[in-house]
């Protein structure tokens, strides 16, 4: 059995850890509320915009819309959207696991994989691998310091420019989609080229080319509205990931605090047993000494 001093030191240590995890849980809960409000407001708009983007792109010729061009896939860009910090359970790990699976499938098809890291945890992991890419805006981890559309837009512009220039033939987003505070859905989402409408993609009948009435004109749609829509899609994915991160961290810290409570109960029980045993030994020694003096 551990000594009283050892058990007492462990109780102090676990209690300090519990205070830290409880504080982190409260901080994450406060940040989650704001992040959750942001993604709940953004998601319906971004999803509807994505549907409209697919429909409009399908009505344009391939030469008109360079972001919808389907070409032979030789180089693939995976965008890993994760967090800057840990202590969030399997939040980052499940994204890395999905990327590893998708990369294995892509390489089996003869495609060359590249990974763009949006989040310090991904940058630390992929910096030492052949998948690491350069030529994008510096210090991407700082995107989460006051996450906003204006900060995300230059990254989306760089991705679109490299796709339009033929450097990458397909771009996929990997992130955690926010469901609720306790649950996140790890997601792989096509970013470029723009996917055709769902009915055509699933092969339900012949491909229907709709002639949309466009305002102000086709040129403006292609040069301004489609790129802005793609920027919003990336921003929505980052908002999803940001809210998911705080939900995952709050849940992880809640579990850690509960585990600390359980461990404290066990340690206090051990401490009381050890203390009682020490008192019993002292009493026995006193009684033994008194009996020896009588003898």
Image (cartoon, grey):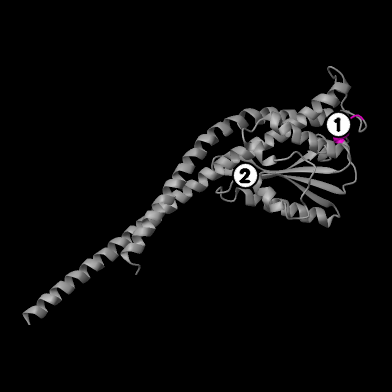
First of labels 2, 1 by sequence position: 1
Residue occupying the point 63% across, 49% down: 92
- Disc 2 packing (10 Å; few <14; some 14–19; many ≥20): many
Vertically, is 2 above or below 114?
Answer: below
Residue furthest to the right in view is: 63
Q: Quadrant of residue 192?
A: top right
In the picture of the structure, the residue carrying the numbered disc 2 is 84
Q: Quadrant of residue 81?
A: top right
Residue occupying the point 93% across, 32% down: 63
| Residue 188 x, y percent position in the rendering | 72, 44
User: Total of numbered circles in the picture?
Assistant: 2
Instruction: Specify whether residue 19 is in view.
Output: yes
Vertically, is 101 above or below 158?
Answer: below
Residue 264 lies in magenta, yes or no?
no
Q: Main secondary structure of the magenta part?
A: helix
Residue furthest to the top in view is: 216
Q: Give the side of residue 78 with respect to residue 148, left or right.
A: right
In the picture of the structure, the residue carrying the numbered disc 1 is 58
- Tell me the magenta residue range: 64-68
Residue 66 lies in magenta, yes or no?
yes
């Amino acid at each position: 059995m551990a000594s009283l001093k050892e058990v007492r030191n462990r109780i102090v240590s676990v209690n300090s850890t519990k205070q830290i995890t409880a504080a982190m849980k409260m901080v994450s809960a406060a940040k989650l509320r704001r992040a959750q409000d942001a993604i709940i407001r953004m998601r319906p708009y971004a999803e509807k915009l994505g549907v409209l983007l697919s429909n409009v792109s399908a009505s344009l010729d391939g030469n008109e819309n360079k972001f919808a061009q389907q070409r032979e896939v030789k180089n693939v860009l995976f965008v890993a959207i994760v967090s800057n910090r840990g202590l969030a359970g399997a939040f980052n790990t499940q994204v890395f696991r999905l990327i590893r699976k998708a990369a294995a499938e892509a390489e089996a098809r003869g495609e060359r994989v590249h990974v763009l890291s949006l989040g310090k945890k991904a940058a630390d992991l992929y910096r030492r691998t052949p998948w690491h890419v350069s030529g994008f805006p510096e210090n991407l981890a700082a995107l989460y310091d006051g996450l906003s559309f204006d900060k995300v837009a230059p990254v989306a512009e760089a991705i679109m420019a490299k796709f339009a220039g033929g450097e990458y033939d397909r771009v996929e987003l990997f992130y955690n989609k926010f469901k609720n505070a306790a649950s996140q859905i790890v997601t792989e989402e096509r970013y470029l080229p723009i996917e055709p409408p769902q009915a055509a993609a699933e092969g339900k009948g012949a491909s229907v080319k709709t002639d949309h009435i466009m305002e102000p004109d086709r040129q403006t749609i292609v040069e301004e509205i489609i790129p802005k829509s793609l920027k919003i899609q990336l921003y929505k994915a980052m908002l999803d990931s940001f809210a998911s991160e705080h939900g995952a961290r709050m849940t992880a810290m809640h579990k850690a605090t509960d585990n600390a409570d359980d461990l404290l109960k066990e340690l206090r029980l051990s401490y009381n047993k050890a203390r009682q045993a020490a008192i019993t030994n002292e009493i026995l020694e006193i009684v033994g000494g008194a009996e020896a003096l009588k003898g």
